[in-house]
Image (spheres, helix red, strand yellow):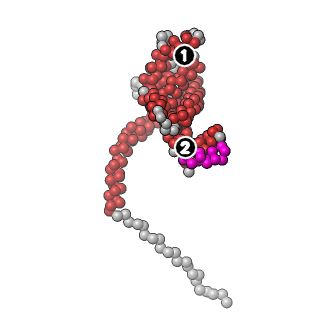
Amino acid sequence: MVSLSPPRQSVRPAPPPAPRRDPISRRRSRLGLVYAAPMAVLVGTLFVVPLVLMVWMSLNHWPLLGASAPNGLTNYQALGDPLFLRAVWFTLKYTAVTTVVLGLIAFGLALLVQRNRRGVGAVRAVLFLPSAVGLASTSLLFYGLFTTDSSPLNELVRLVGLGRVDWLGSTGTALGSTVAMITWRFAGFYMLILMTGLQSIDPVLYEAARIDGAGRWQTLWRVTLPLLRPTLALAMVLSLTGSLLAFDQFFILTGGRHDTATVVIDIYREAFLSQDLGRAAAVSVATLAVLIVVNVAQMRLIRREGR
């Protein structure tokens, strides 16, 4: 026989009541908001508001002197300008050369001074000392070394018998001279970052590698570099960001001549020489987008390697 009784309905247990926050937790939350409010106002005033204004300017014809008018995405046509594309190419070339040269020298110095030995503290201080000099001051110092005939650098070249070298007279020499200056300025800074990463590696791992018969190069490739990847990624983020935003060194040393104009120098020219703040803002927005992509990729690498 067929049962005509209604089907049984499953009874779901009632969800547990939401935990109530005690007055002390609520007071601490409000106190945290009060402490964070000044920094939030500062970030909003100095970063968010200028960023919104820059995006708005990029969508308008905005002369340095005069009234603005909306023009949509017309300003972004500056991204296809031949002068801007040359600036992009030179910036990428400078970034690649600087990142490789500076990274190798800083890593070599970090390997030399990572162990605490007698006198190594003084060596670290001497190597780090150039980092305390401002970039504009360093550029002015090296401008005198590169352009003055009686500078110690040119006197040394004469003693070697190479004749007078125009250090800033062409794209190649200007690029090499600037990379040398940046390496002198920042090698000690990145050395300190990499040295901190090296000292965080457990010495037991090196002892185990020696017991297994690994040589110095095998230990470097199999132990040091894999464990140093997060620190290397951090140093690369700083190096890439600083190189992509290069301005002071080339503005002081070459003024952007001989095809040594970077992207930031191109922004400066658009804003203050061509007096077109709208096109300068469009180039700035594109540059910011590239920097965000680069930094997000690097931070993901750091988090992945840190797991």
Number of numbered discs present? 2
- The x and y percentages for residue 10 are 55, 78
Seen at 51% across and 38% down, the residue is 115
Q: Main secondary structure of the magenta part?
A: helix
Q: Give amino acid for label 2.
A: Pro
Mark 2 and mark 1 lie on one chain; the one further toward the N terminus is 1
Q: Quadrant of the N terminus?
A: bottom right
Lateral position of residue 52 relative to residue 231, left or right: left
Seen at 37% across and 39% down, the residue is 45
Q: Which residue is mark 2?
A: 230
Q: Which residue is mark 1?
A: 167
Within-10-Å neighbours for mark 2: few <14, some 14–19, many 20+: many
Along the viewing direction, whichever of 254 and 285 lies nearer the viewer: 254
The reply to whether the magenta stretch includes residue 44 is no
Q: Is residue 291 at all visible to an observer of this figure? A: no
Lateral position of residue 106 relative to residue 214, left or right: left
Q: Give amino acid for label 1.
A: Trp
- The residue sitting at the front extreme is 118
Along the viewing direction, whichever of 14 and 224 lies nearer the viewer: 224
| Label 1 residue SS | loop
Lateral position of residue 218 relative to residue 73, left or right: right
| Label 2 residue SS | helix
- The residue sitting at the bottom extreme is 1
- The x and y percentages for residue 134 are 42, 27
- The x and y percentages for residue 184 are 50, 26
Within-10-Å neighbours for mark 1: few <14, some 14–19, many 20+: many
The residues colored magenta run 202-214
Q: Is residue 17 at all visible to an observer of this figure? A: yes
Give the Cα distance between marks 2 and 1: 37 Å
The reply to whether the magenta stretch includes residue 205 is yes
73 w.r.t. 87: above or below? below
